[in-house]
Every structure is written in C-alpha cells, then in structure tokens.
C-alpha cells in the first residue's frame, strides 16, 4: 500500500485490510469502504464487538451514498435486528437516512424533528432537517430564512454559508453572496476557490480595487494560477482601456498586468501538449503587452 494513498489491495491480512478500510473512510471513498468492510466482516464475523457493528454502519452509509438499495436494506436490517429494540438515537437517525435514500422525505423529516426536540444543539440533525426542508420547500425565500436562522445559532457551519451564498448568487444578489463567501474565508483563508469567487464577484459589482486584491492573493498562494493571472489582466483591461490619463497608482497596476502577461506567456509557451488555440492565446498576450507598454 502506498503511503497516504488509497489503492485496491487484494491481500486478506487483517492488519492490511484494517489499514485499507481506515484510509478509505478518511478519504471518503464509499466503494472501497464497502469492499474492505465486507472483507473485514468475513474475518471477524463471530466477534460481537463494537468494531464489527461500526463496520456495518459505515457500509450502510456508503451504500446510501451510492444508491445501492439492496445493500442498504441488508445492512440496515442487520443493525435494526441488533439495536432496534433499544429505540436509540443512532439507529433512528440511520432509519431516517434510509428513508431519505428511498425518497420517503416526509417520514425522514418526522424522525429528525422528533430528535431535534431532544437534542436541539445537534448540528447533524439540524443539517439533515434543513436539507430536507430545502428539498420539500418550493418558496426559496423560506429556504433563505431557514438557513439564516440556522446560521445565527451555528455560525461555524461552513456548508450552510456556502449553500446560502450559492442561493444569493443564483438570484444575482451579489453583495449578499459576497458576505457569505467572506465568512467562509475567515475559517478557510487559503482556499483558492473561495478567494477567486470573491475576486470575480467584486469585479461583477465594479469594486475593482478589492477584486484586484483577491486575484493577487490567489497568485501569491499559487503563482501559476491561470484564473488569477487572467483575472488581473482582464480586470485592468476593463479599468484602463478607455482611460486617457494615468495616475501614479495606475502605473503599479500596469506593471502588475505586464508581469501577469509575461507569466502567462511563459506558462503557455512551455506547454508540451498541442493545446487548441495555443498560438492564438500567445498572439493575444503579445497584443495586450503592447497595449500596456
């Protein structure tokens, strides 16, 4: 097995299987969770241990993710047979997940609501209720209100911030969307996707200075980031194409643009693949360089 990588392994040695299984869980590869989980169960089938039932649970969750209905029924039945009489939280949450996989969303929602009353601060239950309500709710304004209410109580739920940002973005509420994306960046400050999204949104609302700063940040993190390099160039083309006089800070932007043009030209020139329109891109960069000199 290669270190830090999950690969298919044909060995049936217990320690090797356990390592492969654990890595599959950590890397969230449901196909391999099922494969190695089933192999482990064949070895420890007689042991009535927590580890064994934990494997059943993880195989069930992986099967739900892959929509393997036969496996879902099989492994939930095994868990329900063992723990159903206890009527505990975990088995009922799993039952709700099974209902979701079968599109029985109302039944699943009722289970989650029942447990929310007992565990009002459980983020997993809250997240599941929100996801189901979003699916069942036709009024997008109610979904927005639902997410906002949730985030007042759980401001560190980055997935909900992202969902809310995408909803605002779809409705062209760019300033609201930006607020959500910047909340995410407070907790994930080097995430290039969110940095570049903020850069493009500031460009959209004509906040060119802030847009430029975010594009520059993306290039600082990854100096060959094409989206960031092109962003700086297109941003300054928009800003200065119709300007007749240049201020002192304009010269800084021009120098920055020329550096980005040169870096892109270098990156495309060194490509060893036959990229479609490669020569056209290089010609365009040469033309831009002449315009900014």
Image (cartoon, rainbow, N blue to C red):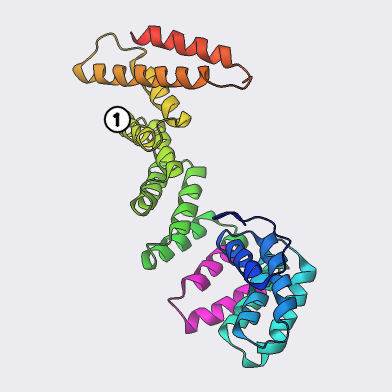
Indicate whether 32 appears above or below 223: below
Q: Main secondary structure of the magenta part?
A: helix
Can residue 65 be seen by looking at this rendering?
no
Q: How many marks?
A: 1
Q: Is residue 37 left or right of residue 22?
A: right
User: Which of the 4 quarters of the picture holds residue 212?
Assistant: top left
User: Quick check: 8 left or right of 175?
Assistant: right
In the displayed image of the protein, which residue is found farthest to the right? 70
Looking at the picture, tell me which residue is in the foreground, 158 or 129: 158
Relative placement, left or right, of 160 versus 104 is left
290 shown above or below 160: above
Residue at 35%, 16% in the rendered image:
258
> From which residue to which does the magenta span run?
104-133
Q: Position of residue 106 (x, y in %)?
A: 65, 72
Give me the residue at 38% from left, 32% from top: 219
* Residue at figure coordinates x 39%, y 17% from the top left: 237
Looking at the rendering, which quadrant does residue 136 occupy?
bottom right
Name the residue beneath numbered marker 1.
Answer: 209
Indicate the position of residue 293 as horizontal and vertical percent values: 33, 8
């Amino acid at each position: 097995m290669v270190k830090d990588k999950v690969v298919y392994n044909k060995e049936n040695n217990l320690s090797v299987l356990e390592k492969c299984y654990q890595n599959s869980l950590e890397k969230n590869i449901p196909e391999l969770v099922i494969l190695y989980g089933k192999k482990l169960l064949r070895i420890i089938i007689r042991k009535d241990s927590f580890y064994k039932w934990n494997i059943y649970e993880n195989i069930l969750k992986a099967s739900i993710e892959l929509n393997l209905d036969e496996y879902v029924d099989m492994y939930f039945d095994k868990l329900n047979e063992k723990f159903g009489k206890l009527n505990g939280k975990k088995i009922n949450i799993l039952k709700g997940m099974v209902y979701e996989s079968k599109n029985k969303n109302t039944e699943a929602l009722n289970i989650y609501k029942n447990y929310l009353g007992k565990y009002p601060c459980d983020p997993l239950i809250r997240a599941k209720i929100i996801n189901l309500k979003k699916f069942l709710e036709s009024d997008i304004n109610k979904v927005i209100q639902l997410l906002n209410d949730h985030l007042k109580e759980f401001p560190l739920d980055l997935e909900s911030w992202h969902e809310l940002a995408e909803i605002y973005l779809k409705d062209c509420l760019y300033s609201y969307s930006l607020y959500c994306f910047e909340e995410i960046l407070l907790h994930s400050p080097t995430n290039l996707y969110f940095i570049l999204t903020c850069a493009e949104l500031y460009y959209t609302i004509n906040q060119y200075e802030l847009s430029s700063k975010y594009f520059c940040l993306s290039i600082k993190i990854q100096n060959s980031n094409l989206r960031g390099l092109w962003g700086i160039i297109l941003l300054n083309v928009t800003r200065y194409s119709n300007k007749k006089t240049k201020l002192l800070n304009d010269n800084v932007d021009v120098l920055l643009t020329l550096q980005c043009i040169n870096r892109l030209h270098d990156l495309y020139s060194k490509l060893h693949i036959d990229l479609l329109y490669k020569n056209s891109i290089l010609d365009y960069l040469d033309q831009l360089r002449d315009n900014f000199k």
